[in-house]
Amino acid sequence: MNLQFKTVNIDNLEELLPFYNLRHNRTCDSVFLESFIWKEYYHVRYAIWEGKALLWLMESGGKCFSAMPLCREEDLPGAFKAIETYFNEELGYPLVINLADEFAVKYLNLPEDKYLVEEQVDSKDYLYDGNAMRTLAGKKLHKKKNRVNAFKREYEGRYDYRRLCCSDSHEVWEFLDKWRLQKGDDVEEHLDYEVRGIHDILKNCSSLYVRMGGVFIDGQLEAFTIGSYNPIENMAVIHIEKANPEINGLYQFINQQFLIEEFADVEWVNREDDMGLEGLRKAKASYYPADYARKYLVEQLLDGKKGYRWAEQIGNTISGSKIEYLSDNEKQETKRLWHSCFPEDTDKFIEYYYSEKTKDNRILVKKDSGLIVSMTQLNPYRVSMKDKEIDTFYVVGVATDAGRRREGHFRDVFLQMMQDMNEEKVPFLFLMPADANIYLPLDFAYMCELPLMELTREAKERLTAVVCHDNEEDCQKAAEFMEQWLSARFDMYCLRDGAYVSRLLKELDSENGIMEFLYDGDSLAGLKASWGDGRKVQRLLYTDETNVGVTGRKPMIMARLTCTEAFLSLFTLREPGEELQLKIRIEDGLMEAVKGNYVWTVSAESSSAVKTAETWDADDRDVLTAAPGELIRWLCGYERPEEIWPGISKEKAGRLELIDTVNNVFIDEIV
């Protein structure tokens, strides 16, 4: 069947719009903006059937479903048959249509022995008389009118209703971000998608057929709303309405004013459904709807039997999802996701990884209806830092299913991971970014750049290479050389032992690589490893500086502070002397456990940081205000205080210089 499904975006707007308003439909789905707002949440895709109808393919909880085709009434049976055939023959599923409009259901008159047709009661849209909503006349709406009048009296001369346009996008974004923060972390997942949909509208408002209005109080936007128009039904559809909940009467005022200014003549106002939420149901019922736009589940039956009852759960509510660590027996379930997200990795390498690295690692996943949609893997390492040893994790295998990206799953998994590390008092996590811009918003910062080295021509001629084999003697010899070489040059690196080298040799072998001892006569002078098919790529080179030429340096490893107390306690003063006490204010928009004021007491022998409820003035010169990434860059020796905080006073910079920060970090592990 030749149906080519494409994603909904602004570029195919002109292809989509002609199929709207071809038949009666009083649901909110009768206008394009509804599909545009929720395109990511439901992974909305469309195909055009014979130039007559718009067919839909959507997804929730890993299950596919459709919506009623958009077309002329007379083309509805053919379009319905086309999408049914696609589901049966291409997807191997019975057809499920969610939120089918009442007009289409009645017109199709589907046989009861072949289809289940059930009203989705919680999904019906509330329809109001347009004139009643504009005037608020009559006894029923008297309380609403009183609230509007009370608002006008209280803010007389201070409020202003304005029609919003593209140039107002910045004000709306600012309001929206503030509104989202007020909601906190417990907000329903679908609201995050709604916010993204609004951002998309604002970015493309000049191309969309959209009407927007806002209420400004003392020059600041305090409420806004977005609607669109269905000319067949002479109906306004109110998609978005947000207001500062602390301002009495504001919701009622913008509700009325938007209709007066932007939809002065509409007969009907559709204010969408209540999602089965009691609070929304009461709010919508309080305006006394004149009717409802009822919606139905249409489910194809198999031999007259009711199968695929999952469809009843889709509706407008979110599907069940959870974030959890996999047991050892479950870890192999993520191999498919690794294959699809890292196609550059060979089958042999992936087999090595899942047979070796998963023996002792942790895999944190987000599941949606039992299906893994996103993951990150935490590989344990013991890090040497000066005279200390730190247990931490290397974050690898960060992946999200291609069809579920840009939905927030990656962020959800990372926030959970960071919170867990805080509770375990792990000072920091580290990773090698494919793209630093992915991790900067999560306050990861570079802590390490590595020298790019090659053996000189003279060294290649002088040194003799001998293969390092995966046996106890060779592994121990290589580990001892690595430790000696690293500890002489770097303050921070991952500890090596025989088991480390044995695993490294298996990793190299999985990519057709080898490691070699480099001998200068009878003396061990270095280690070199290379891997890859065809022309080998250097994986590591540890030898004396006289044997190499440095061709450059490359930022390699980023880290994220996860436990302030544990991290700061790793550092002491450079020299013996009086105890130093520093006040540090950490600004962290992601981790409440990291954010806050800390008193850091440091001497040459000891160090401790204590979180305090004490408040400090913003201009207190004794306070260092820092983001987690800034502390990483400073204390790991990546940048000096003057580079991180350009306006820092000489006195404060001098005090910070007393701290014995790390001098050179070397982390070159791949996984």
Image: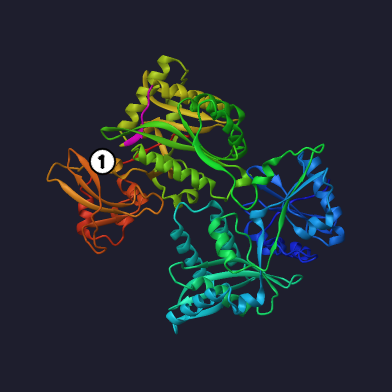
Give SS at disc 1.
Answer: loop
Outermost residue to the left: 578
Q: Relative to 440, is 498 above or below?
A: above
Name the residue tied to disc 1. 569
- Looking at the picture, tell me which residue is in the foreground, 624 or 504: 624
Relative height, residue 530 to residue 149 (above, below) = above
Q: Is residue 494 magenta?
A: yes
Left or right of 657 on screen, residue 27: right
Classify residue 22 as left or right of residue 146: right
Which residue is depicted at the point 37% across and 22% down?
524
> Whole-percent x and y of residue 201?
60, 65
Residue ID at (84%, 61%): 73
Residue 148 drawn above or below residue 6 = below
Q: Residue at x 47, y 66 (%)?
A: 174
Q: Which residues are magenta?
A: 492-497
Badge 1: residue crowd in 10 Å (few <14, some 14–19, many ≥20): some
The amino acid marked with disc number 1 is Ser
Asked whether, in this view, residue 112 is left or right of residue 411, the answer is right
Residue 379 location (% of width, % of height): 45, 32
- Image-quadrant location for residue 137: bottom right
